[in-house]
Image: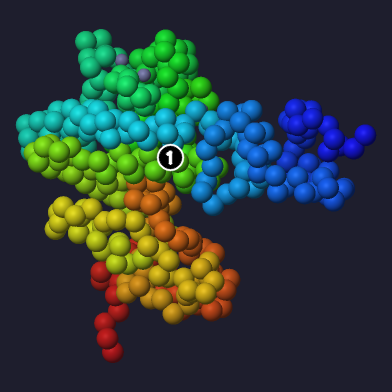
Amino acid sequence: MLLLELPNEILWTILHFVPPRDSLCLLKTCKSLYQLKQDELFWREFARQYGMIYLHPHQTWWQFYISGDLKKTCPHIHDRFFMETLTKKAMVFWNTLLSFSSSFQQQQQQQQQPSEKEKEKEEKRTSLFYACCQEQGQKLNGGGLCLSPHCQFVGCGDAFFSPEANPGHLREHYHATGHTCVLKLSSLHFCELFCYACNKPVGFWGFPSMEKPIGERYLVRSIVQTLVNTFPKDPYLKNQAIERRRAIERRLVWSQQSHEDSYIIERSWFMAWNEFLFEKTDQIPGVLLNKSLFCSMTTNTLRSDIELGTDFELVGGVVRSYIERVYDIDGPVVSAYELQWKPEYRKICESILFRRHIMQRGPQGIPSDP
Ligand SMILES: [Zn+2]
Ligand SMILES: [Zn+2]
Ligand SMILES: [Zn+2]
């Protein structure tokens, strides 16, 4: 009996136990079996068995399967489910965030120049301000809002150590209702998705060196970007929301200043972002169009004639992944480290080294013109 004559259910059962790379070898053993690659319906139905119903728009179901991401992607978020209610969620999102910022601002007004210790205390207090726990004053972090449609629940996160043994009200809400996905709010990362069923962050690990599957990242980016760009209609609240976003982004950029900048991004976008951060405008920049730094024919080859300070600027890894998540980046992002061994980028590398040298020595490090 030929393998292909087996019912799909049996083929799927076999595939459950075979790693994707090995099944490619299996498919290569026979021409008709190899044609199964083209059968999108077959692979889509297979992914369904893992609860997966969404995909990166540039991927086919077969590519999704063979990439090995099928078992790594959170199946609990999907577009229709969230997208329809996201604009309503945005109001809950801003209300929650602004309730922190008002207590934050009050404290800042009371103490004109708070000491470092007081600042730290303030930050803790503001990030712990969840109505569900106000009376108990419990020290819980990473609170946020439930993302299930028609659910308005807002609550605190788990304790930092052994979170499952010391659950916050958000996790308890998940156990009581089965609402798996929440949006956690943070004064550094702004907002991130977390799935209690997978018990992991979704779309973003919190640091840029480990990447999540591309389909998951894509969907989370669209959720986050819809939320953060749907401002309250009331002009006063809208203003407050913009202020809050600016404060979070400034804190992120400052906290990253001592880290080595290594990612190349388009300068015109960088300048527009700076104008927003330094209150020259309330206009929030759009998508970062990094494509202009690449050769138009082969979109993933960086141009060698671009200049630091004219065409491009540098940002660190955490800032880069923030931009990707909250603003979106159209085009690839290259790390300066990748260019070190390529002679055509010698000029670019020298200018980056020179910039670092100045940053370390301060403005007096700039040699005067002969
Ligand atoms: Zn999940
Ligand atoms: Zn609570
Ligand atoms: Zn809920």
Could you tell me which residue is drawn at 54 percent across and 52 percent down? 58
Q: Amino acid at mark 1?
A: Val
Task: Identify the image quadrant of residue 314.
Answer: bottom left
224 with respect to 271 (left or right): right
By what rule are the colours in the image chosen?
Answer: rainbow
* Residue 346 visible within the image: yes
Q: From what the image shows, is residue 263 above or below residue 154?
A: below
Task: Identify the image quadrant of residue 99.
Answer: top left
Q: Percent from the top left, x then y, of residue 184?
A: 35, 30
Could you tell me which residue is drawn at 35 percent across and 24 percent down? 149
Q: Secondary structure at mark 1?
A: helix
Q: Percent from the top left, x then y, of residue 244?
A: 20, 40
Q: Percent from the top left, x then y, of residue 321?
A: 42, 49
Task: Identify the image quadrant of residue 264.
Answer: bottom left
**What is the crowding at mark 1: few (fewer than 14 residues within 10 Å), some, or many (at least 20)?**
many
* Residue 352 visible within the image: no
In the rendered image, the quadrant that contains the N terminus is top right
133 with respect to 164 (left or right): left
Q: Which residue is mark 1?
A: 220
Q: Nearer the viewer, residue 245 or 22?
A: 22
Could you tell me which residue is drawn at 34 percent across and 51 percent down? 327
Task: Give the farthest residue toward the right.
Answer: 1
Could you tell me which residue is drawn at 27 percent across and 23 percent down? 128
Q: Nearer the viewer, residue 369 or 12?
A: 12
Q: Nearer the viewer, residue 109 or 114?
A: 109
In the rendered image, the quadrant that contains the C terminus is bottom left
Q: Percent from the top left, x then y, of residue 15?
A: 75, 34
